[in-house]
Image (cartoon, grey):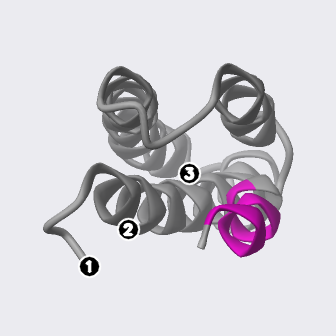
Amino acid sequence: MLHTPIGRLRAIGFVEAISFLVLLLIAMPLKYWADIPEAVSIAGMAHGVLFVLYLLAIANASIARQLSFRMAILAVAAAFIPFGPFLLDRKIR
């Protein structure tokens, strides 16, 4: 799976989507309901790093011509939607 640009994109997209959900569904409630702001600091940092890796994976797949320009734009847009990379994964298999 990690041997091709599309495989790397799919794997990083999956991990990035999980980190986004952890940030939204676990870290944010801990910050505002349990008064633990460190949760957002840690999950936010991890998600930020994974988001940058996801964008680099999109660029890599586009440069390798395994991802069309339209799909690259959809991949970037999917990163901003919860569950977006999961839905995109079905299209780029």
**Mark 3 or mark 2, earlier in chain:** 2
Residue 15: within the magenta?
no
Give the quadrant of residue 61: top left
In front: mark 2 or mark 1? 1
Badge 2 marks a residue whose secondary structure is helix
Residue lying furthest left: 3
Q: Reply above or below: 2 against 9.
A: below
| Crowding near the residue tagged with mark 3, few <14, some 14–19, many ≥20 C-alpha atoms within 10 Å | some
Q: Nearer the viewer, mark 3 or mark 2?
A: 2
Q: CA distance from mark 2 to mark 1?
A: 8 Å
Q: What range of the chain is rendered magenta?
A: 85-92
> Mark 3 — residue?
36
Query: Is 77 rendered above or below residue 50?
Result: above
Q: Residue 41, position in %: x, y?
A: 42, 36
Looking at this view, is 23 or 51 the one in front?
Answer: 51
Give the spatial CA distance, label 3 vs label 1. Answer: 37 Å
Residue drawn at point x = 44 percent, y = 43 percent: 66
User: Looking at numbered disc 3 in the image, what kind of residue is underneath it?
Assistant: Ile
- Whichever of callouts 2 and 1 sits on the residue coming sooner in the sequence is 1
Q: Name the residue at 80% across, 55% down.
A: 84
Residue 4 falls in which quadrant of the image? bottom left
Please state which of residues 86 and 45 is positioned toward the viewer in this rendering: 86
Main SS category, magenta section: helix
Type of the residue with mark 2: Ala
Query: Residue 54 placed where, x, y %?
Result: 42, 38
State the separation of the CA atoms marked 3 and 2.
30 Å
Q: Residues within 10 Å of mark 2 (few under 14, many from 20)?
A: some
**CB contact under 8 Å: marks 2 and 1:** yes
Residue 26, x across and y down, in percent: 67, 67
Q: Label 2: which residue?
A: 11
